[in-house]
Every structure is written in C-alpha cells, then in structure tokens.
DNA sequence: TGATCTTACGTTTAGCGTAACAATA
DNA sequence: TATTGTTACGCTAAACGTAAGATCA
C-alpha cells in the first residue's frame, strides 16, 4: 500500500470529482482513475459507484476515506516524531536569563560539540524553570543557584552592574551608587538584556526606561544624549561608546549577580568538564 | 512513503541483519540495502550506524521502527475495518433458537436478497439477546415475543412437540402426554435442535438424554432401539424413520411454541414484507 | 573462508502523461 | 458543446536481481 494513493483518495473525497482532485494534486485524471481502481484491489472491496461518466464513493468508500485519513495522520505524526527525536539528539538548547554568560558558554559548547546545533534564548527566570522541568532545555543559566535539589548547579560567572553617565551629570562625582540613588532618573536601555530589564524596573520603580530595540539607534542615543545608561564588567564596548562617560558601580546585591549553570543530573558531568 | 519499505525496516529490526531480513521476505539483500537508504531519505534523518560490513539501528532508527510498527498496525486495522464493514453490508446474520424456522426463513431471504450472504447460527436465548443488543445479528428468531420494547416483533411459526415411541411402548396407548408423564424416561436426541435441548432438560429433570451428534448414528438408533424420541409438526421425516412409531402430542405450553422474528426497528419493514 | 553489506549493471516492471473515446448535462 | 471518467499507447523512471567488490571474524 502506498500512502500517495491514500492521499489521492482523500483528495477525491474532498473535491468530489476525479478531475478536480487531479488538478489539485498536479497530476492527470487518468492517473487518479487508475489509482482508485488499484485501491479497490488493495482493499479487496468495491469503494465506488460508477456511472458512465461519473464516480462517487459508496458507503464502504466513505469508510475507507475515514480510515485513510487515520493512516495518513499516523504516518505524518511518525515522521514528525522521528525528526524531532533526531533533532533533539543533535541540539543543545540553552535558556539564559542574560546575554553575557552566553558569550562564554556558546563558543565553549560549539567547540566541544562541533556537530551539535546550539540553540539559545533569553527568557525570564520563571520561564527558565519551566524549560528545565519540561526538559525543553538541556542547560539553564540562572542569576542564582537553582531552587530545586534535583537540578545540578555550578557557579559560573559574576556580573557587576555600573551606571554610565556623562561627566557633567549630577551623579558623576560619586564613586558608587545604590538603586535608591538612581530611582527617579530615566535611563536608556538596550532590548536584549534578559533579566536585567525586569530587575531595573523592580528596583527603580520611579524611573522610566527608554528601551531601544535597534542596536544602532541605542548607540546613537548614548552618544548624543546625556541620559544615563548601564554597563557591566562583562560588557564589551566595541564601539568605545562609553569612554567619554563615567562608570559608577551599583553596590546593591541585586546588581552584582553570580550566574549558575543548571541542568539535569545526567548532563552535568560533561558540562562541568567544560568550565 | 511505501508501507512495504516500513515492513522491511521492521523485519530488519527483528532479524538483526539485512541478509536474514531479505531471506525472510524472499527478496535480495541489495534491495533491502537500497530500501534502508531510501527510508533515510524519506525520514530525512540518519537511522543507522554503518560499519564496513555491518549495519545497525541508531537511536533514531529504533524510534523509527517503533513508529513504523504503529503505522503498519494502523494500516492493518484500516484494511480489516473496511473489509469488515463491506462484508457487513453484504451479509445478513441470523441468530435462531431452533432449526425449524430457519428452513423457512433462509430460502425466503436468499431469494429476496440474492447477492447477500446469509449466515445463520443456533444459539441459546440469552446469547440471541446479546447478539441483538450488540447488533451482531440483524435478525433473531426467538421462542416468544422479544422482551424489550425497542425490538420489533412478528409472530412467525408455531411448532408443536410430540414424543415418538414404538407401538409396544408403555406410553403408546396415550393420546396425549405431559412432561410430568415423560419425566424419568430416557430419550434419544439429535444435537442440532437449539433451545429444545435445554427445554427438555428443564422440564424432565429425571430423564437422561442420549445426544447423537452424528445424524446417521441418530437415525440408526431410532430405527434399532425402542428408546423414545421427539418430533414436531415442522420436522420433515425424509427417511420415513417415524412411520413405525406412534406420535403423541405433548400438551404443556412449553412444548408448543410460537416463534417470533425480532430485529431492530429500522430493518423490520423489509422483513415484514417478506412474511 | 564464509558471512555481511555496498556498489555497479542490465533488465523488467510499473507508473505517468498524452491522446482518443464514450457518455452526460 | 463542455465536462467527466475510462481505455489505449508509448515513454520514462524506478525497482529489482545478479554479479562483483570490500571488509570483517
């Protein structure tokens, strides 16, 4: 039995005539005529009532169409299942709360597993726990050690937040600041900063954040405005955007995070070996 | 996708080598080699680990076999379902409590529906109700009108039991008998008599019944022994077995039954038209 | 050396499209 | 007359088996 033939049967059932079915499937009518005859042989029963120039499904034919749909759907599911399984064997999925750790993790994994696809995405911390629970990610990067015992944890990197202001800014003369000092000022923010975004909004509820989704626009605004922005010890300022600005460390504990790598136990040994 | 190819994949998985699979399927090894390559194309993923002269399923391959079994089983079920459905459209199944009504019903149905297969079987009354409930039979023949309202009933035939004894027998002089008169005598019984068998045992618990499954042996015993046996107004004595015996009507109501034809409402009109 | 898998080659088969035909609305 | 389904015919592509090659136990 050929699934193509079942497809033709179903198309005929949907279209009502062999001609329309042929047109839809981009094949000739005679081909469908022959296929229908062949299907009757395969099933071993009559499936159609034939007039001189018209053909329709009989009761058995309708039943056969029903079953054909079932078979095709099963086959389609099978293909998807196998492909998904294969893909999962060749993919490492990483959910991270922030971009900076990925700059170190991705190259390391890529060179350690050159024939694997490494897929990463930034997500909120609750979403990352969901990914871990559902095994939708193999590796998670969290801003603290994982809540649950059944995940393996290793501390990985520290990231320390600083605020960047022009030399003329009110804050420029301070050697350190706290969120309460900053609360009320408005900031420029890049869009791809993971959990930092949420954290800023929580700790500086009186501030407003001008989020720039376009990297070019963000850089242009940093250069041309006097609005404060943020950087960290891990950020690379390839455009030397911030050389003209004063960097002031934020001392709150929330602003100085240790990233942890978390994953299910069985994967941990390999990960630890890498870092 | 071709189900034949999946069959080959499964056979390979079961046999362990391509050669053995080829042997089992009565095809050449190269054919299987090519089929496996083709399946990898179809699935779009690698399914095997290949040595220079050995081939085994990889993890994805094992998954694929699993799915292939699923598909084949679905397809197999589909074929069976369609064939069974078609058969049901061309078959009238009759469950009867006794043989005599069938002698009239079967010829009538055969000539009314010449292209239908008519299948009949003798069953106990409870089994007949089960067949009606599950729609496993289209027509039932019961020794009374059907218990439930949702079945249609028509009275069909009467059958009256008589006992047959040699002229020299103790009972021979009676003009009628009851089961209590007969209780304690031993009887010859044919095997294919439906509910009569059970009914005799219930009404004559002290009697023993010598059931002859072979028709020839039954006739021989009737001829050569003086044991009483039974007949009815509907029985045809083609061998003139009973001409030498005295027939005495059994007057109990249980011994004089009216057969009813019963079926689901929708079938009744056609049945009534016949009788 | 025997078993196993793959590749190469030639043949056969089976599937497809075009064209011709029959029948209907 | 335009549309629909079937049959006939010829071609192409795909599937098969035999044979040969390579590798391992």
Image (cartoon, coloured by chain):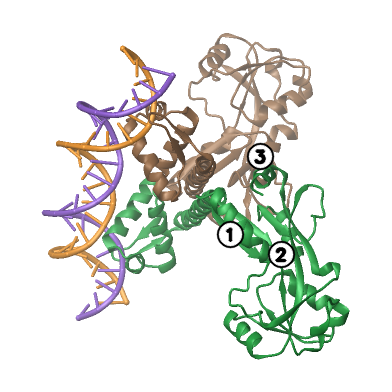
Chain colours: A brown, B green, C purple, D orange
Towards the viewer: A244 or A85: A85
- State the SS at label 3: helix
The reply, left or right, for residue A168 in relation to residue B254 is left
Q: Are marks 3 and 1 on the same chain?
A: no
- State the SS at label 1: strand
Q: Nearer the viewer, mark 2 or mark 3?
A: 2
Give percent across and percent down for residue A172: 67, 17
Q: Residue at x 53, y 44 (%)?
A: A67
Q: Residue at x 38, y 31 (%)?
A: A52
Q: Quadrant of residue A235?
A: top right
Does residue A193 lie above or below B13 as drawn? above
Does residue A42 lie above or below B157 as drawn? above
The reply, left or right, for residue A147 in relation to residue D13 is right
Q: Residue at x 45, y 39 (%)?
A: A48
Q: Which residue is mark 1?
A: B119
The reply, left or right, for residue A81 in relation to residue A255 is left
Towards the viewer: A221 or B273: B273
Which mark, residue A128?
Answer: 3
Towards the viewer: B227 or C7: B227
Which mark, residue A268?
Answer: none
Q: Residue at x 64, y 42 (%)?
A: A131
Give percent across and percent down for residue A159: 63, 35
Q: Which residue is mark 2?
A: B97
Q: Quadrant of residue A245?
A: top right
Give percent across and percent down for residue B31: 28, 58
Of marks 2 and 1, which one's residue comes earlier in the chain?
2
């Amino acid at each position: 039995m050929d699934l193509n033939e079942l497809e033709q049967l179903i198309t005929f059932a949907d279209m009502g005539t062999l001609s329309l079915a042929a047109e839809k499937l981009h094949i000739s009518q005679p081909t469908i005529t022959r296929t229908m005859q062949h299907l009757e042989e395969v099933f071993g029963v009559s499936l159609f009532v034939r007039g001189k120039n018209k053909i329709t499904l009989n009761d058995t034919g309708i039943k056969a169409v029903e079953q054909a749909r079932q078979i095709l759907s099963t086959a389609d599911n099978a293909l998807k299942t196998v492909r998904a399984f294969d893909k999962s064997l060749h993919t490492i999925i990483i959910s991270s709360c922030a971009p900076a750790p990925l700059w170190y993790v991705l190259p390391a994994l890529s060179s350690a597993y050159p024939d694997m696809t490494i897929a990463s995405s930034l997500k909120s911390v609750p979403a990352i726990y969901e990914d871990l629970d559902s095994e939708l990610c193999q590796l998670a990067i969290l801003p603290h050690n994982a809540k649950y015992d059944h995940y393996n944890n290793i501390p990985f990197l520290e990231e320390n937040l600083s605020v960047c202001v022009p030399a003329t800014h009110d804050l420029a003369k301070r050697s350190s600041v706290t969120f309460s000092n900053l609360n009320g000022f408005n900031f420029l923010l890049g869009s791809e900063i993971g959990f930092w975004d949420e954290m800023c909004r929580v700790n500086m509820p009186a501030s407003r954040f001008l989020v720039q989704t376009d990297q070019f626009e963000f850089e242009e605004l940093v250069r041309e405005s006097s609005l404060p922005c943020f950087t960290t010890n891990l950020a690379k300022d390839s455009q030397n955007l911030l050389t003209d600005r004063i960097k002031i460390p934020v001392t709150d504990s929330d602003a100085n995070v240790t990233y942890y790598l978390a994953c299910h136990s069985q994967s941990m040994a390999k990960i630890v070996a890498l870092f």
